[in-house]
Image (cartoon, rainbow, N blue to C red):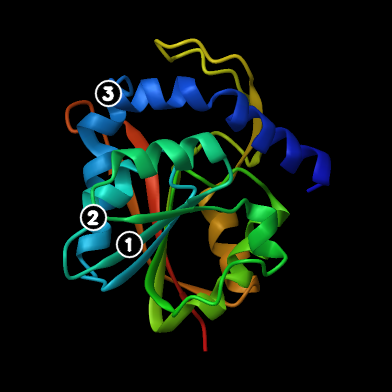
Amino acid sequence: MPGSLSDEILSSWQANSQSWITTIDQNEIISRQLATNDAIVTAIEQHNPSRVLDIGCGEGWLSRAIYAPHRFVIGIDGVEKLVSNATKKGGGPAYACFNYEDIRQGKLPSWEPFDLIVFNFALFEDRATFTLLNQLKQLLVPGGHLLIQTIALPAHEFSGWRTEYWRSMKTNYPAPFPWYYRERDEWKKDAQQNGWKIHRFTDVVHPENKQLLSWIIELQVAF
């Protein structure tokens, strides 16, 4: 993906950071409360990891939700205001400010490997996504897992770029941004071509009307 689109995504999140904090603090996204928050927490806890890296952590809700005294959790995000808010809220995890280009360029600290790395609705790019994920292979212990929760495309929709205008939000968001949506088959193909195997591919559905809300994709490095 051209660098300008990566920059546009990051700039949008910087502009929208306070709006996002308000949205999460006030529980304004109903699908998260009904299904997707519990789904990603459950997927993480199934592995009982001792070291977790939460990438694109935002204001840190997921890092706090999975933190336990026996577990090291660190959340990173490219938006300083979100990282500062997460740090202020505390709750046990550590936080640091790194953007996705920092990761692609190998600028993360020399952390000990993690049992689990998670992206919760935090992957927005097309080809650059797997350049990012491939850079993280060295940060996973042998047999470790990478979990992705992402918006699911209905069967009649195709992969491609969409623009997120935040129209469903109660809070005003000043900046739209581009988001690349992948079909299920494209996730599978791209994972295989980049040296990942899919451990599990889970549909997350609305508990009442059974509408498909998201996918949780669990990857492992293919040896």
Residue 52: x %, y % from top left: 35, 66
- Up the image or down, 178 lies above or below 106; here it is above
Q: Is residue 129 visible?
A: yes
Residue at 45 percent of width and 45 percent of height: 150
Picture layout, residue 190 above or below residue 115: above
Secondary structure under tag 2 reads helix
Comparing labels 1 and 3, the label whose residue is closer to the camera: 1
**Disc 3 marks which residue?**
27
- Answer with left or right where residue 207 lies relative to residue 151: left
Could you tell me the amino acid type at mark 1?
Val
Q: Which residue is mark 2?
A: 66
Front-most of 168 and 23?
Answer: 23
Q: Which mark is residue 73?
A: 1
- Residue in the image at 47% along x and 43% along y: 83
Asked whether, in this view, residue 176 is left or right of residue 197, the answer is right
Label 2 near label 1: C-beta < 8 Å?
yes
Q: Is 9 on the left-hand or right-hand side of 66?
A: right
Question: Along the polypeptide, which appears first: circle 3 or circle 2?
Answer: 3
Distance Cα–Cα, label 3 vs label 2: 18 Å
Q: Residue at x 62, y 71 (%)?
A: 134
How would you rate the neighbour count of disc 3 (Cα within 10 Å): few for under 14, some for 14-19, many for 20 or more? few
